[in-house]
Amino acid sequence: MTGPGTDLPRRQAAGLLAGASNASIGGEDTIVAVSTAPGKGAIGIVRMSGPDALPIASRCVRPTRHETLSPDSHRLTYGRIVDPGSEEMLDEVLVAVMRAPQTYTREDVVEVHCHGGAAAQRAVLRLLVRLGARLAEPGEFTKRAFLNGRIDLTQAESVAAVVAARSSGALRASLRSLEGGLSQHLRAARHDLIGHLASIEATVDFSDEDVDDLDWTGLADGLAHVEERLRRLLRTSFLGRALEQGVRTAIVGRPNVGKSSLLNALLMRERAIVSDIPGTTRDTVEELMEIGGIPIHLVDTAGVRSGGDHVERLGVQRSLRAMEQADLILAVFDLSTPWSEQDARLIRRLDPARSIIVGSKADLVDAGEHECLFTGIERLSQTIWPTCAVSALTGDGIDQLRNAIVQLIAGNEGIRPEEPVLATERQRSLVQEALDATAAALEGAASNRDEELICEDIRSAVLALGRMTGEDLTPDLLEEIFSRFCLGK
């Protein structure tokens, strides 16, 4: 379920537990929860973890071919689960025994694979609680994996991201972090900063002894390298948010320019009503799709124009609101009709950093007229825009538009599975904090500022990166992070 982990020192985990509940490393209780999603299914898994997982299971599992449940690790046993008081059979099950430390939590783990109906899972869960297990808190299995040193905090967050992944790109990025890709980058930066900090402190502490003077040029070069590493990592935060939450993409333009046809062409099915009558779309039409591994929330909006009846004016208001709330805007202009003042007003509303100019109905005009429209827009706005000419009728240009969408979101290199991505706001803010502190230290090194002040900036950066991976963390923050997980994970 996860990579090999980072094997954090156990004294670090024990330190985190000062003031925390005993449902953590070294705790005496055994936790249990249903680990499969609610609803009907062929199989439901009830998972236990803790020192009494095997004894509790042994009291209620009746193997078909053996008298007792085998204590051997990673063995699957077929049998029945019964109430030991009445010997009433609750379900026919497979039981997986996994002994510490080769388990997800590094504790003894027993999984009861029962039938997937809610009643069967509930009956098994209630029995295990009655026999001594405690209902797990959200994310408590992964929390124990972290506290027991199997994974670090960025990997723990990636577990939740894998569960929540809604696109192939989100899944690849989450699995990369789960394998430790993000952690490796963070630890490399933190290791370099600690090395620079040690060099400065040695120069200060042993200034009266035979210690070489501080190499200010080497220090500045080293800090510049760390700064660039963090800056490059921070640039992935928009892509990380896009993969986690999806990109809300508004299709806007004046009436009858082909917005609904573009929506249908991107979806490759007839989702929105298409008509030559202006104002056919009077409310937003939303659909979720995947482009280049990125989840895209397409929002087809009412045509933006003045006038119209009351209902159409309400639709226009919603269109403008959709533009403001969108992460990405596909601004559609009809290549086959003359430029209008309504088009100009729309251009003035657009943000070039999150907009693509789409020339529609390209099958009705010559290629030269495409460039004429795009050049006119750039001249009007004094801005160079990403542009694409498409024909919803023939499909020409649709693939190019998909590529332009991915490029605007992920950059020229697109989604690179081997590169780490910042997936949460917590990660983004901590990398920003570390970057700011590193930049301040670099500025101090370049200007020969007092060494103690430079040390303070570097310590701040080291602390921020430590909070990313869990080397420096408070129990309260730990509870907040894992409370966002689902039950049974």
Image (cartoon, rainbow, N blue to C red):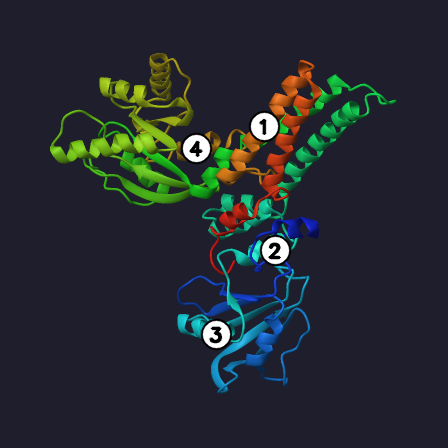
Is label 3 or label 4 in front? Answer: 3
Q: Cα distance, mark 3 to mark 4? A: 48 Å
Q: Cα distance, mark 1 to mark 4? A: 29 Å
Residue where numbered disc 3 is placed: 124
Is label 4 or label 2 in front? Answer: 2
181 vs 139: above or below: above
- Image location (x, y in percent) of residue 171: 52, 47
Give the secondary structure at mark 3: helix
Asked whether disc 3 touches disc 4, contact meaning CB atoms under 8 Å apart, the reply is no
Asked whether disc 4 touches disc 2, contact meaning CB atoms under 8 Å apart, the reply is no
Give the secondary structure at mark 4: helix
For marks 1 and 4, the one nearer the N-term is 4
Q: Cα distance, mark 3 to mark 1? A: 50 Å
Give the secondary structure at mark 1: helix
Quarter of the image containing the N terminus? bottom right
One can see residue 277 in this view: no
Residue where numbered disc 4 is placed: 405
Q: What residue type is labelled 4?
A: Ile
